[in-house]
Each structure stands twice: as structure tokens, then as C-alpha cells.
Image (spheres, rainbow, N blue to C red):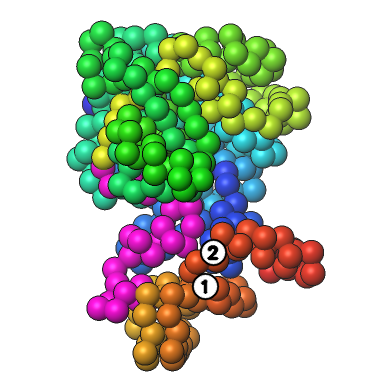
Amino acid sequence: MNKDNYALIMAGGVGSRFWPVSRVEHPKQFIDFFGVGRTLIQSTYDRFLKICPPENIFIVTNEIYADLITEQLPDLDPNQILAEPIMRNTAPCIAYGSMKIAEINPNANIVVAPSDHTISNMDGFIAAITQSLEAAAENDCLITLGIKPSRPDTGYGYIQYMEKTLPADDQIHKVKIFTEKPNLELAKSFVQSGDFLWNAGIFIWSARAINDAFSKYLPDMYDIFHLGVSAYNTTDEKGFISNAYLQCTNISIDFAIMEKADNVYVLPTDFGWSDLGTWASIYDMADKDYVGNAVIPSEQVMMFNSSNCMVNVPEDKLVILQGLHDYIVVESNNTLLICPRTEEQSVKQIVADVKSNFGTRFI
């Protein structure tokens, strides 16, 4: 295993689309949605143990989740948990993590990944990450993983790539353009063209390359975090970061760097990826009965004349559903949500309305 390989796992989101199971104080990355005995972040950590030495895996999260990280990943050293004082999107957390890792190992090659993805083809995932890390170590480039689309999905961003490839790896293509979530007609044209990929939000680069990119394309943020080089990995780090984040703009790594840099490449992949962004993605991946019902857990749920439902309820509750088709039925934390599957995008607005009416009690 290459001692220069590092992983930076982003685990600071609140997962509001999975409300009411996902709450602000216990969001989706800390939940075992499929009843497999490992939460999403634990499964992500397990994957990277096959790629990086355990001491080279870092978790960046909101400071309110630091104790949950310690509880679910007890093998981590406290220095491997990067606690953000406030949410500022992905660019600041990557700048923080990359500069901290560079102070440990200037020759580091880093894979940055969200904590809430699922992967069904582990061997394919490991091969793609390893290939990209090797390419990043030998080339001054920023690499992202693109997923070969299986359908014209409007819930993902897309990456168009060119025929041009890295000199030493003809599978890693130069990126032509990033496109935000398209409408259905545009998504269909993307899939038909054959040169568009889903944007997985997984990035691979050397610490040197990404820090140079911050210096070039986001110099103000680079300066903010570069001031802390003497504080990283010391007792002064927390105090420095508390002040640094107050100065950061709220901006994504995609918009800040990936869409602007001229050395961005993509590796087309297909390893059974899902970003678990909505209840529909849980439904798609869950085991179903012969009429399409996905019930987790299923011991005390009885379905009569019901089909294609996504059901997630407490284990100790008896639930009977009669004549329900294509619905989401979710109960957690003294809250019951019943919503047509076709209207699941409204869950985020529902959460906002609940907060407006009841405060944060149910959020």
C-alpha cells in the first residue's frame, strides 16, 4: 500500500432530503439505511482502508459531529478529524484538508470523496481510485471520476470529455465542460452523445497540484489557509481554523476551481455508484418484494394490495399498509412522513415549512 496515498472524506452535510430519519443532530452519513450493520460513513471508511494506510484517512466534518465521528470510527486519531466551525461548502474544507495533509507529507496524493455514497463493485472502485492516484502522482493535473450514465437523470451534474488524454494513461480524458443539473431533454441528449458522464464529486490530485490550483484560481482562500501552515497538526490548529473559516466565502470546489482550471481530467468509470441523494436512490438500491415494495426493516410491516412503496419505520412498531401504491412512508423521531414517490423533491421544502411552524424541535 502506497504510504503517499491519502483520503479526505467529507462528512459535514445535514441530509435534509432524508428527513425525518436524517436530522441536523444525526444526519444521513451516520445512519445505516440498508440494515447492513455499517453506517454510510463507516462503509466509506472501510473502502478507503483498501487504498490508504489507516493513519492517512482524514474526515472533515462540522464540529458538532466530531463526537459522532469518534463514536462510529473509534480507530481514528483526533488529529484525523478536521472539525469545521461553520459550514462553508466544499472549497474551504478541501483547502483546509489539503494544506494540513501537505504539511504531513509534501508528496501526498489525495482522493477527496463524500461520506454518503454507495458502491456495489468494490474491485472496480479500488481499481479506478488507484489508477487515478498513480496518474496524479506523475502528472500536474486534477482528476475527477465520471460515472457512465445509465439513464438521462436530471438529478446529477454532467461532465463532457474530449478525445485528448493524459500522455501516460489513455483512459483519463481532458474535461471539456462541466454542466449543472439539466432538464430532461438536455439530459437525454447528453446520454445519447456518448461523451457525457455523471459528476460523482470524487476528486484525485497531488497535494501540490491542488494547492497550486487554489493559489491560482482562489488566491484569497489560499492565503487564508496558508497562514496556518505552522499551526496544522499542532494544538494551535483549532484556534486558527475557527478564525480562518470566518473569512471564507461559501463556494464549491467545482465552481471555484474545477470549472476554471485548464488541467482537469476525468476517468470514465462504472462501479455501481449512487450518491444517495434522495429516498428514490435508497429505493433503487434496496431489496424489494415481488410487487416492488422496499421495506427496511421488514419484520413488523404488513403490506396489503400495495406496491412500489419505500417504507422505513422503527423496528418495534407494527405497521399495516393497505391500498398504497408508489409512496414513501417514513417514521423516525416522533415524526411520520407519507409522500408520493413522484413528489419526493418537495421534502426539502417540507422541512423548511416544519421549521417555520414548529421551530427546530422536529428538525
Q: Quadrant of residue 34?
A: bottom left
What label does residue 197 carry, if any? none
From what the image shows, is residue 46 above or below residue 52? below
- Residue on which disc 1 sits: 340
The magenta-colored residue range is 271-295
The foreground one among 113 and 8 is 113
- Residue on which disc 2 sits: 344
Could you tell whether 117 is left or right of 29 in the image?
A: left
Q: Badge 1: few (under 14), some or many (20 or more) residues near its Cα, within 10 Å?
A: some
Which percent across, then down, holds residue 32?
Answer: 41, 61
Q: Badge 2: few (under 14), some or many (20 or more) residues near its Cα, within 10 Å?
A: some
The foreground one among 291 and 110 is 291
- Asked whether disc 2 touches disc 1, contact meaning CB atoms under 8 Å apart, the reply is yes
- Is residue 338 highlighted in magenta? no
The amino acid type found where label 2 is placed reads: Glu
Which percent across, then down, holds residue 292?
Answer: 32, 74
SS under mark 1: strand
Which percent across, then down, holds residue 171?
Answer: 24, 22
- Is residue 280 highlighted in magenta? yes
Q: Residue at x 43, y 89 (%)?
A: 323
Could you tell whether 23 is left or right of 177 in the image?
A: right
The foreground one among 77 and 147 is 147
Q: Is residue 117 visible?
A: no
Q: Residue at x 22, y 16 (%)?
A: 170
